[in-house]
Amino acid sequence: MNTVNKPPAPYPSRQKLAAQDRSLPGLVTGKLRRALDAMVWSGARRAEAAKAAGMTDHGLRAAFKRPHVMNAYLREVEVLRANERARTIHRLAEIRDAANNMPAVNASKMLLESGETEAHRRGAVQTPGLIVIVEGANARVHSAKPTIDVEPVRGPDRSRDDGADG
């Protein structure tokens, strides 16, 4: 059998160059990971993060439509929120002991509480079905309204019940 062995190409193909540093299917790696890290950890806007990672803004926006990308982003935001929590508590203590600075206190409270509400929102599973509301002993009992029984009034030409003609 005669097989021809081709020597390796002196340069990578166009497809191989395009696929370099691209995320694998279902994973967030390469340029996409760098863009997400720039957004979460450096506070970069989406367009700036995309440019820093070597992506287009449209490409990063389209990536956010995929569930695994959005989940990776939200996980990183939760890690950032957890990391900032201790610093926020220390800052609240400083503000408490210093001058009246209510806007900073309110912002810190919101930051601390938003992590809890996000976790509750994502942890709660909502399924369609029946909702049963159990009220306490002081609940009002609604009495049923009386049923009104009405007999139809028959005209002179509709005196028979069987509906037969003539």
Image: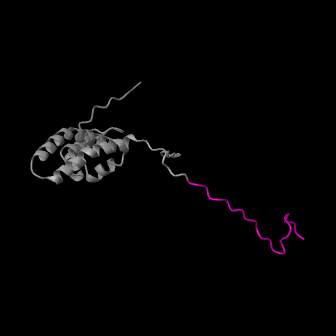
Placement of the N terminus among the 4 image quadrants: top left
Residue 13 is situated, as x and y percent measured from the top left of the image, at 28, 40
Q: Residue furthest right?
A: 166
User: For this rendering, which residue is in front, 82 or 48?
Assistant: 82
Q: Residue at x 27, y 41 (%)?
A: 78
Placement of the C terminus among the 4 image quadrants: bottom right
**Image quadrant where residue 72 sits:** top left
Q: Residue at x 13, y 46 (%)?
A: 96
Residue 126 is situated, as x and y percent measured from the top left of the image, at 45, 44
**Image quadrant where residue 27 sits:** top left
Q: Is residue 69 visible?
A: no
Q: Residue furthest front?
A: 138
Compared to residue 97, the image places residue 155 above or below, namely below
Q: Is residue 76 visible?
A: yes
Q: Residue at x 81, y 74 (%)?
A: 155
Q: Is residue 14 magenta?
A: no
Q: Residue at x 55, y 51 (%)?
A: 141
Q: Magenta part of the protein: which range?
A: 142-166
**Image quadrant where residue 10 sits:** top left
In the picture provided, is 147 more to the left or to the right than 96?
right
Q: Residue furthest left?
A: 98
Residue 20 is situated, as x and y percent measured from the top left of the image, at 26, 40
Q: Which secondary structure type mostly characterizes the magenta part of the structure?
A: loop
The image shows a total of numbered marks equal to 0
Q: Residue furthest bottom?
A: 156
Q: Is residue 151 magenta?
A: yes
